Image (spheres, rainbow, N blue to C red):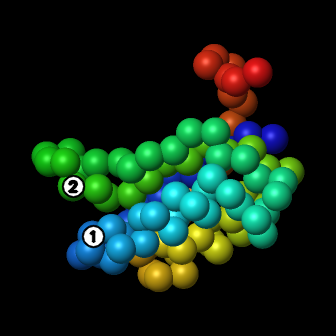
Amino acid sequence: MHFVAFVTHNQGMGQERSRLSEAFGDYIHNPTNYPDVTVHHGGPTLGESDDTVNGLLLVLEAPSLETARAFVADSPYAKAGIISESKIRAWNWLTGRPG
């Protein structure tokens, strides 16, 4: 099942986010604690008036909504308090789908 995660970051966490960006990248590309989760697409979201990162969007495949939520909650960003909110929705991927 596919999901889209809309994640909002806490303001003022840019330095901490930068410090953890490599660990976060490793986490989403090699989710050892979540071998049944695949992140297909992802990247930062930006503020309306500038290029300030204010969150991120992930398109992931997981066996359940609960697993997708746990995956985001266990991320280095979440553990460091960078994430203020995450909304995860099931998604019917129709176009541009791999394989």
Location of the N terminus by quadrant is: top right
Image location (x, y in percent) of residue 22: 46, 64
Displayed quadrant of residue 99: top right
Image location (x, y in percent) of residue 26: 57, 61
Taking the image as shown, residue 73 lies to the left or right of residue 54, namely: right
Above or below, comparing residue 67 to residue 47 in the picture: below
**Callout 2: helix, strand or loop?**
loop
The residue lying furthest to the top in this view is 95
Image location (x, y in percent) of residue 10: 34, 73
Taking the image as shown, residue 30 lies to the left or right of residue 77, namely: right
Residue occupying image coordinates x 26% and y 74%? 15
**Callout 1: helix, strand or loop?**
helix
Taking the image as shown, residue 1 lies to the left or right of residue 41, namely: right
Residue occupying image coordinates x 68% and y 57%? 30
Above or below, comparing residue 34 to residue 39 in the picture: below
Amino acid type shown at disc 2: Thr
Residue occupying image coordinates x 29% and y 56%? 53
Mark 1 or 2 closer to N-term? 1
Labelled disc at residue 14: 1
Please tell me how many numbered marks the rendered image carries: 2
Separation (CA) of disc 1 from disc 2: 9 Å
Circle 1/circle 2 CB separation < 8 Å = yes
Q: Residues within 10 Å of mark 1 (few under 14, many from 20)?
A: some
Q: Residues within 10 Å of mark 2 (few under 14, many from 20)?
A: few
Q: Nearer the viewer, residue 79 or 47?
A: 79
Q: Can you identify the residue that label 2 sits on?
A: 52
Amino acid type shown at disc 1: Gly
Displayed quadrant of residue 52: bottom left
Q: Nearer the viewer, residue 25 or 80?
A: 25
Image location (x, y in percent) of residue 27: 61, 63
Residue occupying image coordinates x 78% and y 69%? 33
Above or below, comparing residue 86 to residue 6 in the picture: below
